Structure formats: C-alpha cells, structure tokens
Image: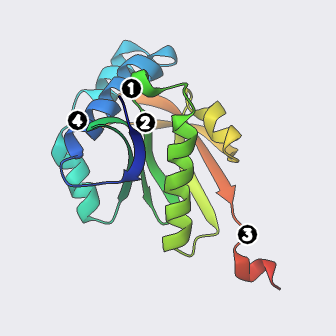
C-alpha cells in the first residue's frame, strides 16, 4: 500500500527531485513548449544543482511516495524558485497540498509580505488558482541561447501584525 506524505527535503531526495523535475518538463510542459525549448530546459540537470541550491539557502518540500519523489517545491524568502510535479502524480490534488506546505513554511520562517514566481505557461492557471496575479509575460534565456516564454507572477500576504493595526 502506498503512503504518500508531503515533507521537507532530506539528504538523498536530490536524485528523485531531479527525476521529477525532468519528467515534469518533458511530459507536462511539453504541451506549451517546443522540443528545442524542452531540451534546453531539461537537458543539463544534475543532482548537484539541487544540493548547491540547498547550500545557498533554498528550502525544498517533496511529495514522498514510499521513497519515490512525486514532486517538489523550492523556495527562498519572497520567491518560489521551483515547483514541479512528476506526471504520475499530477492532477490528483497533491500539487495544491505540496504548494500550500511550501508556502506555509516560507511564511512561517520568513517575514515576507510578497511572493514572486517566474512561472511557465503551463503552470500559469495553477498559480492563479493559488492566488497569484500576472505581472508580465516575458522571455527567459537559457545559457544555450534558447529562449522560453515565462509569466512573472506575484502574490501579496497580509501578515498578522498588519491585521492588528
């Protein structure tokens, strides 16, 4: 029987995070992006990228299905830096739970009143359902020179001390 939990990152999750990340790009985001864009985006992933991000302060939350990573969310204060679902775990309500856990962690551990996301065209409707608004549609350029359209989004929070005024 499968026991799926949403929990903070643990050392050893980095391989599963990378696999979920690449599968999400290749199978979900491919609905909105070209093969060239997908390759530029997913082709150079390695586990050290996630470990290095952790060392510089990025916090990860994961969907853990008995050791298999079904998705992950990464944040730094004021920014969701990554949110990807493995296709096998998408469209099951787990993404919302994962996002809410990571967002709650960010709000609990920092004093932010605003959160930014550079979202994909694919994820834009999800982020809008999570309360984010579009700031602008723009392009992101990978080191290879390949550009992809992205959506800069923002969400404002009212902190408790502000509510008490």
Provide the secondary structure element on which disc 4 rests.
Answer: loop
For residue 37, the mark is none
What residue is shown with label 1?
Answer: 25
For residue 45, the mark is 4
For residue 158, the mark is 3
Q: Return the disc, 2 or 4, that comes first in the chain's sequence.
A: 4
Q: Residue furthest front?
A: 1
Nearer to us of marks 3 and 1 is 3
The quadrant of the image that shows the C terminus is: bottom right
Is the residue marked by circle 1 packed among few (<14), some (14-19), or many (20+) residues within 10 Å? Answer: many
What residue is shown with label 2?
Answer: 84
Work out how far the residue at label 3 is from the one at label 4, CA to CA, in angstroms. 36 Å
The answer to whether marks 1 and 2 mark residues whose Cβ atoms lie closer than 8 Å is yes
119 left or right, relative to 87 = right
Q: 17 or 127: which is nearer to us? A: 17
Coordinates of residue 109 in the picture (x, y in percent): 48, 72
36 left or right, relative to 124 = left
Q: Return the disc, 2 or 3, that comes first in the chain's sequence.
A: 2
**In this picture, is 30 found above or below 111?**
above
């Amino acid at each position: 029987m499968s026991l799926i939990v949403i929990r903070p990152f643990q050392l050893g999750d980095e391989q599963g995070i990378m696999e979920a990340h690449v599968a999400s790009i290749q199978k979900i985001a491919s609905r909105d992006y070209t093969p060239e864009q997908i390759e530029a985006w997913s082709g150079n992933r390695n586990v050290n990228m996630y470990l290095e991000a952790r060392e510089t302060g990025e916090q990860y939350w994961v969907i853990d299905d008995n050791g298999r990573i079904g998705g992950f969310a990464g944040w730094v204060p004021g920014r969701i830096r990554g949110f990807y679902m493995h296709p096998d775990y998408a469209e099951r309500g787990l993404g919302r739970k994962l996002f809410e856990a990571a967002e709650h962690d960010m709000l609990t551990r920092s004093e932010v009143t605003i959160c930014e996301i550079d979202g994909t065209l694919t994820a834009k409707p999800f982020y809008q359902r999570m309360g984010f608004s579009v700031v602008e549609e723009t392009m992101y350029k990978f080191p290879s020179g390949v550009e992809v359209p992205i959506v800069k989004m923002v969400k404002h929070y009212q902190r408790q001390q502000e509510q008490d005024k």
